Amino acid sequence: MLKFVKNHLETIAGVEIYPIISLLIFFGFFVVLFWWVFTAKKDYISKVSNIPLDTDNQNQFKL
């Protein structure tokens, strides 16, 4: 199965740039995500982490 895909992809001109682009997007996304996690304010993190535990009527959906 991989033999057929590999032979087909080798015939496409310029296909070698797509894995590089996807790696850069993947790496960039996680660098930004780690930067946001480490620089986020502790008050915001604690407020957001308590949202599922909040039993206030404002946060509940009414059917």
Image (cartoon, grey):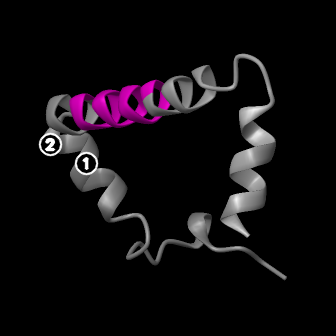
Residue 58 as seen in the image, left or right of residue 45: right
Q: Which residues are magenta?
A: 24-35
Question: Which secondary structure dominates the residues rendered in magenta?
Answer: helix
Q: Are marks 1 and 2 in contact (CB under 8 Å)?
A: yes
User: How many marks are shown on the rendered structure?
Assistant: 2
Q: Quadrant of the C terminus?
A: bottom right
- Quick one: which residue is furthest to the right in this view? 63
Label 1, secondary structure: give it: helix
Q: Residue at x 25, y 48 (%)?
A: 45
**Nearest the camera: 36 or 54?**
36
Q: Residue at x 46, y 78 (%)?
A: 55
Dot 2 corresponds to which residue?
A: 42
**Nearest the camera: 5 or 52?**
5
Type of amino acid under label 1: Ile
Type of amino acid under label 2: Lys
Dot 1 corresponds to which residue?
A: 45
Q: Residue at x 59, y 20 (%)?
A: 17
- Placement of 58 over or under 12, stated as above or below: below
Q: Position of residue 7 (x, y in %)?
A: 74, 46
Magenta region includes residue 8: no
Label 2, secondary structure: give it: helix
- Placement of 8 over or under 10, stated as above or below: below
Q: Residue at x 67, y 63 (%)?
A: 2
